[in-house]
Amino acid sequence: MEFINKGGRVVCCRPLPELIEGQRDKEGLLKELFSKKVSFVKGNNIHEVFGDKSISITDKDSKEIPDIFHQRRHRGAADIYFIINSSQDKEYSANIKIKCRNNVAVWDAGSGGIYPVHGRREGLYLKFNLQLHKAGSYLLITNKNKKIAARPPGKKVKLVTNLKNNWEPKRS
């Protein structure tokens, strides 16, 4: 309750929970919780509850893609978005619309490379397309104070230890 009393927002999907930490609610805490301000979500419409208009990820028909999820973190002047295709069967050509003052860059966390994204400006937003491979993901970065410059990948990865049976990474 402390979380709600300090301004936190609770979002629920139906059916409502009956347990707290795996135990039946004998003290009526759930009843008290649901008597407070709780938002209910139908399907994937969590944006309606929180009103996050900083990013939109849609298909060619401007419909949200149910397999695509994102998380946003705010760090100083930067916003970092982690976007993932949760499907292991489908690839998507996703139209991304992201609110930013300057540019958007893709950060390759594996190599350390940073690559600015080219798109078209639409008011406060930059629109561009990303190909989201099966179970693929992206890290996108924006910075409200400055343009993000390209940065080449870091040093090549070197073999640290030999693995028995000739293990090697492969992409299919």
Image (spheres, rainbow, N blue to C red):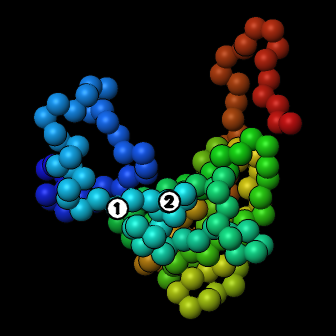
Callout 1 secondary element: strand
Q: Is residue 17 visible?
A: yes
**Residue at the spot x=66%, y=46% of the render?**
86
In the rendered image, the vertical position of residue 85 relative to residue 26, given as above or below = below
Q: In this picture, is 164 found above or below 110?
A: above
Residues 138 and 89: in front is: 89
Residue 146, percent from left and from top: 48, 77
* Residue in front for this viewpoint, 44 or 156: 44
Q: Is residue 114 visible?
A: no
Q: Quadrant of residue 127?
A: bottom right
Please count the marks in the image: 2
Q: Position of residue 141 (x, y in %)?
A: 54, 64
Compared to 165, does 29 lie above or below? below
Q: On the rendered structure, is 50 left or right of 38?
A: right
Image spot of residue 145 (x, y percent):
43, 78
* 29 to the left or right of 150: left
Task: Please tell me the numbered disc located at residue 39.
Answer: 1
Q: Residue at x 17, y 30 (%)?
A: 26
Q: Which residue is mark 2?
A: 42
Q: Position of residue 97 (x, y in %)?
A: 61, 75
Amino acid type, callout 2: Lys
> Which one is in front, 45 or 143?
45
Q: Residue at x 65, y 22 (%)?
A: 160
Side of 105 relative to 29 (left or right): right
Asked which secondary structure carries label 2, the reply is: loop
Q: Disc 1 to disc 2, how far (Cα)? A: 10 Å
**11 relative to 88 in the view: left or right:** left
